[in-house]
Image (cartoon, rainbow, N blue to C red):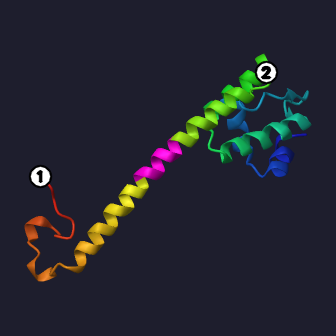
Amino acid sequence: MRIGELAARTGLTVKALRFYESAGVLPAPERQPSGYRDYDEDALARLRFVKAAQAAGLTLAEIRQVVTVREHGGPPCRHVTALLDAHAADLDRRIAEVTALRGQVRRLRNRAEGLDPATCDAATVCHVIPAGG
């Protein structure tokens, strides 16, 4: 199938398909005598995997690693598991940071309830957010 048909069947743009090819997550297809790319059904499966892996938080570089393991060593399940563990740990860290930030924002909001705007010093910009220092 030509690149336009592959794009239509996957919901991706032709530009994205060319990018995935250059990024090494989609193998270069055979070429027709006219020079047009000629993708097979395996390209559809690969692109479904790429989209699912991205939805799981993997980067294109990580997906390329997984593809390389598959192409040179067999099932990449252990490698994928390690990547997912690392992403889960990063998400846990980010969730903790956002939770702490939410607490700080709520404390500042509660602080604002007890402050009088008339007593706000122009040099501090806004006394709801105290400038430490």
* Residue at x 15%, y 55% (from the top left corner): 132
Structural distance between the alpha carbons of marks 2 and 1: 56 Å
- Find residue 24 and name its label: none
Task: Give x and y (percent) for residue 88.
Answer: 57, 42
Crowding at mark 1 (Cα within 10 Å: few <14, some 14-19, many 20+): few
Crowding at mark 2 (Cα within 10 Å: few <14, some 14-19, many 20+): few
Quadrant of the image occupied by residue 100: bottom left
* Residue at x 17%, y 78% (from the top left corner): 115
Q: Mark 2 against mark 1, which lies toward the viewer?
A: 1
Task: Give x and y (percent) for residue 59.
Answer: 61, 37
Above or below, comparing residue 26 to residue 113 in the picture? above
**Residue type, numbered disc 2:** Glu
- Find residue 133 and name its label: 1
Residue pushed farthest top? 72
* Span of residues in magenta: 90-97
The reply to whether residue 19 is in sight is: yes
Residue 49 magenta: no
Above or below, comparing residue 100 to residue 108 in the picture? above
- Find residue 71 and name its label: 2
Quadrant of the image occupied by residue 26: top right
Above or below, comparing residue 33 to residue 54 in the picture? above
Above or below, comparing residue 82 to residue 45 in the picture? above
Task: Give x and y (percent) for residue 16.
Answer: 69, 43
Sequence-first disc among 2 and 1: 2
Q: Is residue 50 left or right of residue 88?
A: right
**Residue type, numbered disc 1:** Gly
Q: Is label 2 in contact with label 1 (beta carbons under 8 Å)?
A: no
Q: Main secondary structure of the magenta part?
A: helix
Residue 96 magenta: yes
Task: Give x and y (percent) for residue 101.
Answer: 36, 58
Is the N terminus in the top left, top right, bottom left or bottom right quadrant? top right
* Residue at x 70%, y 27% (from the top left corner): 78
